Image: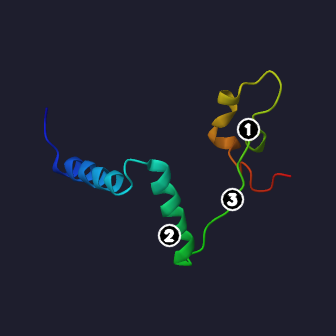
Amino acid sequence: MTRNAILDELHAARRKILADCNGDTAAYLRDAQLRLEASGRPIWQGKQRTIRCIGAATSEVSAVETLSPPLDDRGPLCFNAQ
C-alpha cells in the first residue's frame, strides 16, 4: 500500500483529537460547539430545503427527473418560492 504523508498527518491529528476526548466524539463535538459560540463569530441559521422547494413534488414525475431541468428551462429553484 502506498503511503501518503498528508493522509498520515490527518490520521495522526484525528487520533490526537480522539485521545484528548478519551475517544468520545460526542464530547469533542460539544466542546467544538461551545468554542464556536464563544468565538463571537456569526453562525448561519438556514432553513432545511424540501423536495417541494425544487419543484419535484408533481404527480407522475420522479424527483430524480426534475432535479436537473433542460438548459433552456433553468431558473431559480427556490429563490422566490412561497
Residue at 32% over, 53% down? 19
Q: Residues within 10 Å of mark 1 (few under 14, many from 20)?
A: few
> What is the number of the mark on residue 38?
none
Q: Position of residue 1 (x, y in %)?
A: 13, 32
Q: Is residue 15 visible?
A: yes
Task: Identify the residue at the far right of this view.
Answer: 82
Instruction: Mark 1 and mark 3 in contact? Answer it, CB < 8 Å.
Output: no
Which numbered disc, 1 or 2, marks the residue closer to the eye?
2
The residue singled out by tag 2 in the image is 35
SS at circle 2: helix
Residue at 80% over, 56% down? 80
Task: Give the amino acid type for the residue marked by disc 1 in the picture.
Answer: Ile
Query: Looking at the image, is 34 positioned above or below residue 25?
Result: below
Q: CA distance from mark 1 to mark 2?
A: 34 Å
SS at circle 1: helix
The residue singled out by tag 1 in the image is 51
SS at circle 3: loop
Q: Earlier in the sequence, mark 3 or mark 2?
A: 2
> What is the number of the mark on residue 46?
3
Query: Looking at the image, is 37 positioned above or below residue 15?
Result: below
Q: CA distance from mark 1 to mark 3?
A: 16 Å
* Res 45 → quadrant: bottom right
Instruction: Decide if residue 81 is on the left or right side of residue 71.
Output: right
Task: Give the amino acid type for the residue marked by disc 3 in the picture.
Answer: Gly
Q: Position of residue 64 (x, y in %)?
A: 65, 29
Q: Nearer the viewer, residue 50 or 24?
A: 24
The number of callouts visible is 3
Q: Nearer the viewer, residue 75 or 1?
A: 1
Q: Earlier in the sequence, mark 1 or mark 2?
A: 2
Q: Earlier in the sequence, mark 1 or mark 3?
A: 3
